[in-house]
Image (spheres, helix red, strand yellow):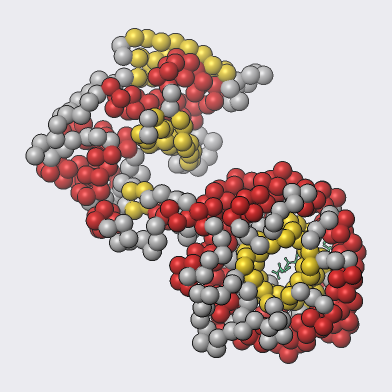
């Protein structure tokens, strides 16, 4: 049945829109990305949890390893339909059938550039081949989506003819593909409107012009009811439209539900870990900064009303709000951060601490909890004895087992311990934990290393966040030696956590 669509380019809240995830196929086509069968299985399970309707698990034509990975996904017996990419050739469909997929995407050329220049066929032969392949796949009980590759640069009349031929041969749906991310929302709307009059339509939009989401929404407004996307927007070149962005845009702007949004952040992290492609900090929904506020006016506004500088609550997408300190921090942000660490300061002291935080940020420094607490101690005169201090560290990594030993001052008592690990940092951290015993009962929540200068003599900054009894502290230390920077950061974080455990708060000045 054709999908009805409104000419006003809007998306009604009662529309049913489903998502097809192609992270395991188009996402994996991003340069340098290769997913093992186990990784594909883990990602497919997470996609299922999130509620994706179709999972394109790979390209069966690529080789035996890929077929094994696709078969592992089909073996999961998921509710989502599991599919494979196939070129417009019977052999590719046979290879997909070997993987026991539920469906195939038969990808045939649509633009003359692809029909003649790439595949070396003619418009007429392409139509005939498409009809034969669709009939063949349907005879094998497959769900079939025909994709007109480079559809956005195709002659629209020919694209319509290709879709019509596909539907007449029994295809379940036709996909409008903006293969090189070349077009805009007006053309997408026009093309999809015409295709949607013929049968169910999907959209596959790339982000080369940064229009991936815009075009996906234009396609939906024109009647597409299945959107191809990838987690984190991974994919060829600038990537595909991001699953999490389409899902939140449909939910927030049009009140159309597609996924369990709370799952998307976990999914993004799993994909980032498996692919080795880091999440860009400023990316919508999943970036580290998406719900982090540093500038004074924003922090103050957010503390007065959560929604002041956020379009939707971070919890909607499985995230938490974070207030950061830096060059643009104001008094409200400092007061909130001090309260979080149970540090009392009067209004004048808060103002002075805010000035010093800004000065530190002005020098290009990222301001951590440890920096704030050191400034606060200096300003309030509230000096404290360190609980733990690193006195000495040695580590070796040349032999079979990396080893390290540390000498610590713990409440005035000297403790020495050694440890082994996967590398010198890991060995040194084991040694610290050995020396501190239960005092080291804290979780290492995050560990980041940045080379501050280039070259092999680079100064590295290690930033750690440690959590103990629901209290978290972030510390950054810079050294030429990565092991020393890591251990100092960790010992300083533990010292801060142990100090707050030991010292009850001084009452605040009114
Ligand atoms: C827009 C997209 O994302 S398209 C999907 C891209 N995905 C991939 O490329 C999957 C990974 N690729 C592979 O594993 C390999 O390229 C294979 C197995 C598909 C093919 O490998 P090879 O046989 O060595 O061919 P090669 O990669 O050099 O060239 C691709 C061939 O596919 C043909 N082809 C490309 N698209 C199509 C299509 N839609 N229908 C039919 N044939 C096609 C090309 O014409 C070319 O054939 P030719 O060698 O007869 O000229
Ligand atoms: C195979 C098709 C859908 C594709 O990836 C594209 O056109 O970009």
Q: Would you say residue 208 is visible in this rendering?
A: no
Judge whether 274 appears above or below 253 on screen.
above
Quadrant for the C terminus, please: top left
Residue at screen point 44% across, 16% down = 437
Judge whether 492 appears above or below 357 on screen.
above
Dividing the picture into quadrants, the one containing residue 130 is bottom right
Dividing the picture into quadrants, the one containing residue 399 is top right
Judge whether 508 appears above or below 145 on screen.
above
Residue at screen point 54% across, 16% down = 419
Quadrant for the N terminus, please: bottom right
Q: Position of residue 47 (x, y in %)?
A: 63, 54
Dividing the picture into quadrants, the one containing residue 383 is top left
Q: Position of residue 176 (x, y in %)?
A: 68, 77
Task: Identify which residue, 358 or 6, lies in the foreground.
Answer: 6
Ligand 1 in which quarter: bottom right
Residue closest to the far left:
510
Task: Identify which residue, 137 or 93, lies in the foreground.
Answer: 137
Q: Position of residue 239 (x, y in %)?
A: 61, 63
Q: Would you say residue 474 is visible in this rendering?
A: yes
């Amino acid at each position: 049945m054709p999908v009805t669509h409104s000419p006003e380019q809007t998306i009604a809240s009662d529309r049913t829109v489903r998502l097809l995830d192609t992270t395991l196929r188009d996402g994996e086509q991003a340069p340098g990305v290769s997913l093992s069968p186990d990784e594909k299985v883990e990602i497919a399970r997470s996609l299922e949890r999130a509620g994706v309707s179709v999972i394109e698990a790979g390209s069966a034509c690529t080789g035996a390893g890929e077929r094994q990975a696709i078969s592992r996904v089909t073996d999961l017996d998921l509710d989502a339909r599991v599919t494979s990419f196939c070129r417009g050739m019977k052999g590719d469909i046979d290879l997909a059938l070997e993987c026991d997929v539920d469906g195939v995407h038969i990808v045939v050329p649509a633009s003359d550039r692809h029909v003649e220049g790439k595949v070396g066929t003619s418009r007429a032969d392409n139509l005939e081949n498409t009809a034969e392949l669709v009939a063949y796949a349907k005879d094998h009980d497959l769900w079939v989506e025909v994709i007109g590759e480079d559809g956005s640069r195709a002659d629209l009349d020919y694209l319509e003819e290709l879709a019509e031929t596909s539907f007449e041969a029994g295809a379940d749906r036709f996909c409008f593909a903006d293969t090189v991310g070349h077009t805009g929302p007006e053309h997408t709307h026009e093309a999809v409107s015409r295709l949607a009059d013929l049968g169910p339509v999907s959209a596959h939009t790339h982000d080369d012009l940064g229009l991936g989401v815009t075009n996906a929404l234009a396609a939906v407004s024109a009647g597409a009811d299945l959107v191809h996307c990838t987690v984190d927007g991974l994919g060829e070149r600038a990537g595909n439209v991001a699953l999490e962005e389409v899902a939140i845009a449909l939910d927030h702007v049009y009140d159309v539900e597609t996924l369990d949004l709370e799952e998307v952040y976990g999914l993004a992290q799993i994909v980032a870990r498996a692919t080795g492609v880091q999440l860009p900090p400023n990316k919508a929904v999943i970036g580290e900064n998406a719900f982090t506020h540093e500038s004074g006016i924003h922090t103050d506004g957010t503390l007065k009303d959560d929604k002041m500088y956020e379009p939707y609550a971070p919890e909607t997408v499985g995230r938490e709000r974070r207030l950061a300190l830096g060059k643009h921090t104001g008094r409200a942000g400092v007061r909130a951060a001090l309260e979080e660490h149970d540090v009392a300061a009067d209004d004048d002291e808060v103002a002075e601490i805010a000035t010093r935080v800004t000065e530190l940020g002005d020098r290009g420094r990222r301001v951590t909890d440890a920096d704030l607490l050191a400034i606060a101690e200096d300003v309030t005169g509230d000096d404290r004895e360190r609980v733990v201090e690193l006195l000495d560290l040695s580590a070796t990594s040349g032999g079979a087992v990396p080893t390290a030993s540390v000498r610590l001052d713990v409440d005035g008592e000297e403790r020495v311990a050694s440890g082994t690990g996967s590398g010198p940092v890991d060995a040194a951290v084991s040694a610290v934990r050995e020396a501190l015993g239960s005092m080291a009962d804290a979780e290492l929540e995050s560990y980041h290393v940045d080379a501050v200068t280039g070259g092999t003599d680079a100064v590295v900054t290690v930033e750690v966040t440690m959590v103990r009894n629901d209290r978290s502290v972030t510390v950054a230390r810079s050294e030429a030696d990565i092991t020393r920077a890591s251990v100092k950061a960790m010992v300083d974080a533990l010292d801060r956590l142990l100090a707050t455990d030991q010292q009850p708060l001084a009452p605040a000045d009114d």
